[in-house]
Image: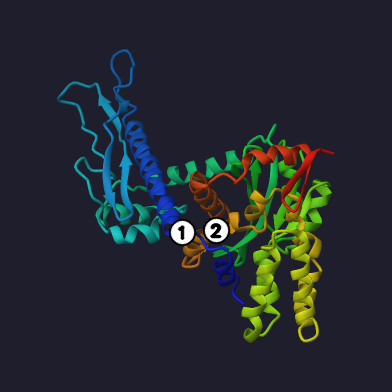
Amino acid sequence: MDLFTTHAAELPLLASKDVLTGILKQGAQTLLAQAIEEEVAGWIEAHQSCRDAEGRQQVVRNGYLPRRTITTGIGEVEVQQPRVHDRRPPDEREKFSSSILPPYLRKTKSMEELIPWLYLKGVSTGDFSEALAALLGPEAKGLSATTITRLKSVWEAEYEAWSKRSLEGRQYVYLWADGVYFNVRLNDGGRQCILVLMGATADGKKELIAIEDGERESELSWKGLLLEVKARGLVTDPAVAIGDGGLGFWKALPQVYSTTRRQRCWVHKTANVLDDLPKKVQPKAKEMLHAIYMAPTRGEGNKAFDLFVSTFEAKYPKATECLVKDREALMAFYDFPAEHWMHIRSTNVIESVFATVRLRTDKTKGCGTRTACLTMVYKLMESASKRWRALNGCALLEDVIAGVVFVDGEKQGDAA
């Protein structure tokens, strides 16, 4: 069974079009701003030899022109162009005019081509040219190889700095982990597996912790990533980690964060169980699985769990074995605040973001590089993170940190 279909039915991606539009709009604005900055920098660099008798440079930056709005196929995008000041005598001055952002441009050309190109392959040299050409029209000039290479280097440098930033003093109450594959072929012919860690801070904010590629979802790859973030300062064990059935992560987790509880993703588990059942019984089985993790108490959840096993065990033992083997990890959420259950029962917090990434990479043709893929994923996640909402019941996270006991989602008293 297709995991994405099951996923969408279980936990629909609310307002996905609005989220996608926001990501693209933010990306368009950033892309334009960075491209124009590089164009201006290139112009000034080309005129470095223009100096007065005292050796002072005559072509310099001088603040910014007034902001203006350009109408695109994804809505209005606000841009601001750096101002260039030429101090040379009037008869020697050259007026800078941006080829990327003409003075009177108010509406983009080829707008219908902007969305599929802007982030589909947005980090390689050639693809940046195509993205900007789609934004401004095929006659757009000023997209020299030097400008595009500089822009690409800026994004790669941003990812490099972010991936090595200090995590000293950071504490994440909940940790989501997932391995995401893309259909972008690498130069060596393989497909890249991106290991993603996200966390919930003590004040309920969701944050992207790490993005790194790995050898499939092996124990060695996950352990290396966990050890790296710990070495950068993430020393406090999260209260619970949420992930799918990737054995590599679950084997690596206790070696780095020994006290962290395990919570198996119900969306992935539902898909796995249904895969072992014939299609004619899948609707009923899906409804019964839903009754387990939506039960208001662990006791009622266990009754629904036992009912599912007794119903299908005789005819479909493989399906029931798939469910029973992870019983403890599937029911861990009952020991945390009920307000948090919707957040910690699945890895939807990661899956929902990467659904839009896959829409692009599934259509990408040609080969990519490891760095290009990582950079693209980072920039998409960075943009999407601006719209992530805080967890429900944020105040209860302090109780979880303090070790307060929760039974069936309800607080039982002070910390033990």
| Residue at x 73%, y 39% (from the top left corner) | 399
Report which residue position mark 2 lands on: 352
| Residue at x 69%, y 82% (from the top left corner) | 277
Can residue 99 be seen here? no
**Residue 42 occupies which quadrant of the picture?**
top left
Q: Which residue occupies the foreground of this view, 76 or 317?
A: 317
Quadrant in which the N terminus is drawn: bottom right
Up/down of 259 relative to 284, above or below: above
Q: Percent x, y for residue 73?
A: 30, 56
Is 162 displayed left or right of 143 in the figure? right
Mark 1, secondary structure of its residue: helix
Report which residue position mark 1 lands on: 16
Q: Which residue occupies the foreground of this view, 281 or 31?
A: 281
- Dot 1 alpha-carbon crowd within 10 angstroms: few under 14, some 14 to 19, many 20 or more: some
| Residue at x 26%, y 55% (from the top left corner) | 137
Mark 2, secondary structure of its residue: helix
Q: Of label 2 and label 1, which has the lower sequence position?
A: 1
Q: Which amino acid, by three-letter code, is at mark 1?
A: Ser
Q: Which residue occupies the foreground of this view, 359 or 18?
A: 18
| Residue at x 50%, y 67% (from the top left corner) | 362
Q: Which residue occupies the foreground of this view, 414 or 157?
A: 414
Can residue 407 be seen here? yes
